[in-house]
Amino acid sequence: MGLFFNKKKPVDLFAPVAGVLESIEKVSDEVFASKAMGDGFAVKPSNGEVYSPINGTVTSVFPTKHAVGLKTKDKLEVLVHLGIDTVELNGKGFEIFVKEGDTVSPETKLVSVDLKFLASEKKPDDIMVIFTNLDKRTLNYEEGNVAQGDKVGTVEQS
């Protein structure tokens, strides 16, 4: 009888939007920067076309269109949060392209964000990718300029 190791493969992470990728700790909202919602990263976007950062399934689309919940096949939960304090916009400035239950990949557009509208409303436009159930997993990523769809890191079993 052979030994069996339940070693999960790393989850690949992709840039959801073109721009500058940075630590979640650098965003201007203390709840996100303190990792109260979970660890993650943010992208200062150069355009408003936001794609899935993972291969997975849509678990929720917030009624205010400012966030989309995703989950990988090995149950890693990902929150894609669009801007800061954007819940107050009640969906204005966002166009959603997915629905709950959809299968997504880095080629799947989740939402278009009107960055000019966010600026006119004085809302920071950081696109945040937050992992709400990392548990014993380790998040690895590289900061710097990214193109949408670039592989930017992994989440691995610890």
Image (spheres, helix red, strand yellow):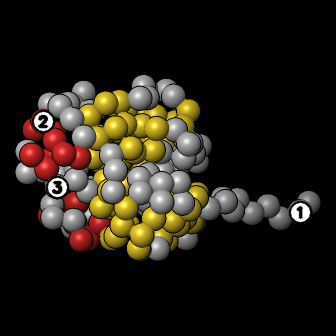
Circle 3 packing at 10 Å, graded few (<14), some (14-19), many (20+), is some
The amino acid beneath tag 2 is: Leu
Q: Is residue 138 left or right of residue 91?
A: right
Location of residue 61 in the rendering, given as x and y in whole percent from the top left corner: 34, 31
Answer with the quarter of the image where residue 154 lies.
bottom right
Q: Is residue 36 left or right of residue 59?
A: left
Foreground mark, 2 or 1, reads 2
Circle 2 packing at 10 Å, graded few (<14), some (14-19), many (20+), is some
- Judge whether 113 appears above or below 137 on screen: above
Residue at 8% over, 51% down? 122
The amino acid beneath tag 3 is: Pro
Which image quarter holds the C terminus? bottom right
Q: Secondary structure at mark 2?
A: helix
Q: Earlier in the sequence, mark 2 or mark 3?
A: 2
Q: Is residue 116 left or right of residue 100?
A: left
For label 3, the residue is 124
For label 1, the residue is 2
Q: Earlier in the sequence, mark 2 or mark 1?
A: 1
Most extreme residue toward the bottom is 143
* Visible residue check, residue 33: yes
For label 2, the residue is 89
Between marks 2 and 3, how big is the CA–CA gap? 12 Å
Residue 112 image label: none
Location of residue 135 in the rendering, given as x and y in whole percent from the top left corner: 44, 61
Nearer to me, 40 or 151 = 151
Location of residue 146 in the rendering, given as x and y in whole percent from the top left corner: 45, 65
Location of residue 4 in the rendering, given as x and y in whole percent from the top left corner: 79, 61
Residue at 53% over, 54% down? 149
Which image quarter holds the N terminus? bottom right
The amino acid beneath tag 1 is: Gly
- Judge whether 35 appears above or below 88 on screen: below
Q: Secondary structure at mark 1?
A: loop
